[in-house]
Amino acid sequence: MDFLEGLNDPQRKAVQHIDGPLMIIAGAGSGKTRVLTYRTAYLIQHGVDPFSILLLTFTNKAAGEMRHRIESVIGSQAKNIWMGTFHSIFAKILRFEGERLGYTSNFSIYDTDDSKSLIRALIKEQNLDDKVYKVNLVLNRISNAKNRLIGPEQYLGSSVLEHEDRLAKIPMMGQLYKSYCARCFQANAMDFDDLLFQTNILFRDHLDVLNKYQHKFKHVMVDEFQDTNVSQYLITKKLAAVNQNICVVGDDAQSIYAFRGADIQNILNFERDYADLTTIKLEENYRSTKAIVAVANSIISRNKSQLKKDVFTSNEEGDQIEIIRASSDNEEGRLIASTIFETRQKENGFTWADFAILYRTNAQSRSFEESLRRLNIKYRIVGGLSFYQRKEIKDVLAYLRFVVNQNDEEAFKRIINLPKRGIGDTTIAKIAVTAAENQMSIWDVVSNINQFQGNRGSAPIEQFADLIKSFKLLVEVEQKDAYEVASHVAKASGLVRELYEDKTVEGLARYQNLQELLNAIKQFVDSEENEDKSLGTFLQSVSLLTNADTNEDPNDRDKVTLMTVHSAKGLEFKHVFLVGLEEDLFPSQMMLQSQADLEEERRLFYVAITRAEKKLMISYAESRYQFGRLKSCEPSRFLNELDSTYLKMAKVQGKKDTSAFRPVQKTGFVEKSTAGSASAAQLIQKPKQNTNYQHVPSADFKQTAPENLNEGQRVEHQKFGFGLIKKLEVNGAERKAHIEFEKGVGEKVLLLSFAKLMVVE
């Protein structure tokens, strides 16, 4: 098979380069996997023993796909290549050589749960406060140390690390790390990070072993090189030191895993380590339209730390990138769900699987999930659970369910020892038995625990019962609305504090999810549509939403994809919605500590843009609930960095079209662009409106049914006053009215499912 025929010139050169160090800079959609596959096949065709080829990837999926592709070209010889993830390959080597380090060949590999269990035991043994020495925090400190090749003795000897730990109020961290390593070794076990850490020690202390594998692997190749950490690069560099046949493939513009320890300097400085390096740039994009490629180039060109390349495409020009302005995050969800629904109806060639919604944080999925469900659009969440299936959400909802209904046994079992209050499974089982024997509810037993158990060991249960009683008062006596109750329950139960204090990446995501739930409850309470604002009614609306999960066919792949931008790396979709482009959200305020952090966020934005094949829409909300308050949002600075030649304001939301957004000296969030064409910020400029006008509703105000509203009618709105219906619009399952209000309020586009309007004569 002459596979060279189908390659462009740089791809062909990369495939045919056999001897010496090679760096392939592969732009988005440039056929990187194809080149790596064919290069491997080419080596074997030209006499290289497949047993002497080491090909390192970052995911098992990537390794599997590549092996399959190589097999299709050269046949079963592909099975003999040493190919897999860093961790799987070096675990294999450690099975052979681990005895040099004091391990047997059958050592255990601890997963995250095993590591956490051991850390909990050590914290207890050393009488440390588990509220300060949080498991996730300790595990992350240990993991980061290992990935930087800092062992326990070095850790304990570092004044910098000692200072950091004292500031973080965990001065015993070094000792915990030492104990953890000792116990792992004693158990003949390695954790995930050890597979790299111990390999580095093996090659450092046993030069004969290193020499053996240096001569074994004549060719070393690394995929996604921009994602390597210090430990991974050092191993790779050592293995290739004899033959110098190292080939790295990557794209510095797609380096987005700094929070996991990835070091972009590995790819930026690679040529310093190899004086005779050949660099080949794959710059032709086969994935996206000219408009998408141009916009992506305009954003990434802003980064200073990068390897220069000129990405281009021979594909069609394509549609302009549409900017969607939504009034709120809930409206953002509705607009995008409606657009997906309408596009799918209009375009015969589209399936649901052709659409993807990408967001910066997992918490943002809620508004899109709810909107998609209302339109009966099937979707899947990649890299996580559906919003209402996430543990922290189910925990809070279980508390709220039990406050409303004390007969809810499943909710009780979930919350009785959450956060931990020293009530074990045995005690819970005894309560259940006592309730059954006395033909009482569990709550009757719990709320009168002294009658059944006496004073011995009943204090934690009494405290729990008092907590629930205080929550019941809010609902039954004070008749607080759903948000007031939920907010108090989340705080008083200790769930908010527990998540807030977990400063790991995972902990932050869980905290954001909990806050988003509270935001959703506040939106429910504030919505004109909901007359009953009680907790029970909110819980009912959630259960109706979540029941849809149980009826889904797990084999059905024709679904809209929802995921974070991080999860989307390496994927492509015909139609991409990139959402939540607001300051503090994207770029993330949590991640911005330096110029390097800003460049990482910009690379993340670049990755998001380059997932789109045919069509890209970018949205932002003008307001979003945060900590229970409606907050005005500022459009992301990244919108202003896009080449506006390829942008237009989307008409989907019923706002004025692009022509209405004339260039002005100063917009709401950025100075006038110095470029020749209007900036994105200028496109987004809003018409001035009288925001001071306060309308007092008529005494006889009574809502007119939405179906009885017509164009040309004069109507009254409780907040905006009197106005004229200029246009009625049907968007999928939504009806909207374009209304020109009086008193300088201006034009508003209202969703008739929410807005209460009365026709006036």
Image (cartoon, helix red, strand yellow):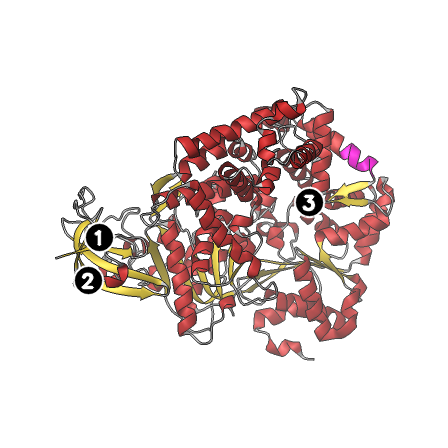
Asked whether residue 537 is in view, the answer is yes
N-term-proximal mark, 3 vs 1? 3
Disc 3 marks which residue?
Answer: 231
**Residue at 65% over, 69% down:** 15
> How many other residues sit within 10 Å of disc 2, few (<14), some (14-19) or many (≥20)?
some
Asked whether residue 649 is in view, the answer is no
Q: Secondary structure at mark 1?
A: loop
Q: Secondary structure at mark 3?
A: helix
N-term-proximal mark, 2 vs 3? 3
Query: Within the image, what quadrant is residue 558 found in?
Result: bottom right
Q: Mark 3 is on which residue type? A: Ser
Q: Secondary structure at mark 2?
A: strand
> How many other residues sit within 10 Å of disc 1, few (<14), some (14-19) or many (≥20)?
few
- Mark 2–mark 3 distance (CA, rounded to whole Å): 64 Å
Residue extending furthest toward the top: 455
The magenta segment: 181-187
Image location of residue 404, percent across then percent down: 49, 39
Disc 2 marks which residue?
Answer: 726
Query: Is 186 included in the stretch rendered in magenta?
Result: yes
Image location of residue 489, percent across then percent down: 48, 33
Image location of residue 506, percent across then percent down: 57, 42
Out of 429 and 19, give the one closest to the viewer.
Answer: 429
N-term-proximal mark, 2 vs 1? 1
Q: Is residue 396 placed above or below 292 in the rendered structure?
A: above
